[in-house]
Image (cartoon, helix red, strand yellow):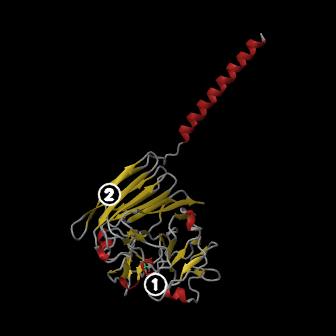
């Protein structure tokens, strides 16, 4: 009798459990947020360049609705929409509405930069006994790969869809002596939007002659939607930075940030010290310097965290690069038309966090090498991860 009762009880308990599992399963389905969607990637035309090349714009969307739009022209990120504290999508990068604006005069809005991010003094360097001359497109210096750097070429695009992420693979063959650089350089940049609201950027390059490579991404961020970025709170994991001369070429020494306006080891607003009397701030017209990131031996690590108190949006930058150029948009001068608006971007409307090797490394033996040999593969990785609080 007892055994029968026990069995009955057990059966009852099992039925209850099954019912509970069923109820929780159905309520799970019912609670699924309407915004949850399958990650996807779409393509549309973005016009034709002045010399007749077709340009496409790809839109990558993740399961939470985060959206990034990328052009085949310059690999330019034209928009990056992330959820703010109120759960609304907010575009956090500067850019133009039209291809012609990007072609005419862009301060590298959203673009891929190569072959060399930042400056090479006097546009000259020597490699294996040969002197190479590059264009001087920034005073006497060479800047961001020249007059037609990777920001102005049309890349070949291949969309890739996986279960929980979408990618856009961009490839470009930079011919031997293009913009003065030796070697046929075959470049691949993989943009991946993950379900964790991260935009990952993987760079790969191979050469058939010894050359120098330093690739980066030049997005201008503004996490508030406001007219300038001075109230953003920034932290940089860097106890050193590279002082520069008046033409923004590093002097060659690594300076300690302690007790200088360049100390972002503890979070502070970008604006707190930017107007301080300081010869380096004068040379940069604000922040336009290369910070030497702590712990290069770790590889992938957090380089920067920046957030805005009102929107609640936080951007964390991770990289395996040794350094990061923090540029506070000092050259923006009200002449660049703002997308989706009749307005113009004001001075310091956006900031850039360009993960990279040090500027002018080809001429500085003290800096980590940027030389790539034919038997090597250049790789570099950066992640822009967004959260809100
Ligand atoms: C980089 C440089 C700046 C400036 C911008 C583009 O960040 O360091 O000096 O040239 O690009 O305007």
- In the rendered structure, which disc, 1 or 2, sits on the residue that comes first in sequence? 2
Q: Quadrant of the C terminus?
A: bottom right
Residue position marked by numbered label 1 in the rendering: 249
Q: Nearer the viewer, residue 258 or 75?
A: 258
Q: Image height check: is 207 above or below 253?
A: above
Report helix, strand or loop for mark 1: loop
The percent coordinates of residue 260 (x first, y second) are 62, 83
Residue 304 in sight from this viewpoint: no
Residue 362 appears in the figure: yes
Q: Nearer the viewer, residue 36 or 315?
A: 315
Residue 270 rendering spot, x and y as whole percentages: 57, 76
- Quick one: label 1, few (<14), some, or many (20+) residues within 10 Å? many
Q: Which residue is the site of mark 2?
A: 157
Name the front one of labels 1 and 2: 1
Say which of 285 and 204 sits in front: 204
The quadrant of the picture occupied by the N terminus is top right
- Occupied quadrant, residue 205: bottom left
């Amino acid at each position: 009798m007892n055994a029968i009762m026990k069995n009955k009880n057990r059966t009852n308990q099992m039925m209850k459990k099954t019912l509970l599992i069923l109820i929780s399963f159905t309520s799970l389905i019912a609670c699924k947020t309407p915004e949850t969607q399958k990650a996807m990637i779409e393509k549309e035309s973005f016009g034709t360049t002045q010399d007749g090349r077709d340009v496409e714009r790809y839109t990558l969307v993740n399961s939470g609705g985060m959206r990034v739009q990328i052009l085949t022209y310059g690999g330019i990120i034209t928009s990056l929409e992330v959820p703010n504290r109120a759960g609304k999508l907010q575009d956090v990068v500067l850019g133009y509405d039209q291809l012609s604006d990007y072609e005419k005069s862009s301060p590298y809005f959203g673009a891929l930069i190569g072959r060399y991010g930042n400056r090479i003094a006097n546009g000259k360097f020597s490699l294996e006994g040969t002197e190479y001359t590059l264009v001087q497109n920034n005073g006497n210096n060479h800047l961001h790969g020249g007059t037609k750097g990777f920001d102005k070429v049309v890349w070949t695009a291949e969309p890739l869809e996986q279960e929980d992420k979408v990618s856009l693979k961009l490839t470009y063959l930079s011919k031997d002596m293009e913009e003065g650089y030796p070697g046929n350089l075959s470049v691949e940049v993989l943009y991946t939007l993950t379900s964790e609201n991260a935009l990952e950027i993987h760079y790969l390059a191979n050469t058939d002659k010894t050359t120098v490579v330093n690739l980066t991404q030049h997005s201008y961020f503004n996490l508030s939607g406001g007219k300038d970025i001075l109230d953003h709170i920034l932290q940089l994991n860097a106890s050193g930075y590279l002082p520069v001369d008046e033409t923004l070429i590093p002097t060659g020494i690594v300076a300690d940030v302690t007790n200088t306006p360049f100390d972002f080891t503890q979070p502070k607003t970008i604006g707190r010290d930017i107007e301080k009397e300081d010869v380096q701030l004068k040379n940069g017209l604000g922040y336009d310097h290369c910070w030497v990131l702590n712990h290069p031996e770790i590889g992938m690590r957090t380089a920067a965290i920046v957030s805005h108190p009102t929107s609640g949006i936080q951007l964390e930058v991770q990289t395996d690069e040794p350094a990061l150029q923090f540029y506070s948009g000092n050259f923006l001068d009200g002449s660049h038309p703002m997308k989706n608006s009749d307005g113009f971007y004001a001075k310091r409307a956006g900031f850039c966090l360009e993960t990279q090797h040090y500027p002018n490394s080809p001429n500085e033996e003290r800096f980590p090498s940027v030389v790539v040999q034919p038997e090597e593969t250049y790789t570099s990785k950066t992640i822009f991860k967004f959260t809100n609080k």
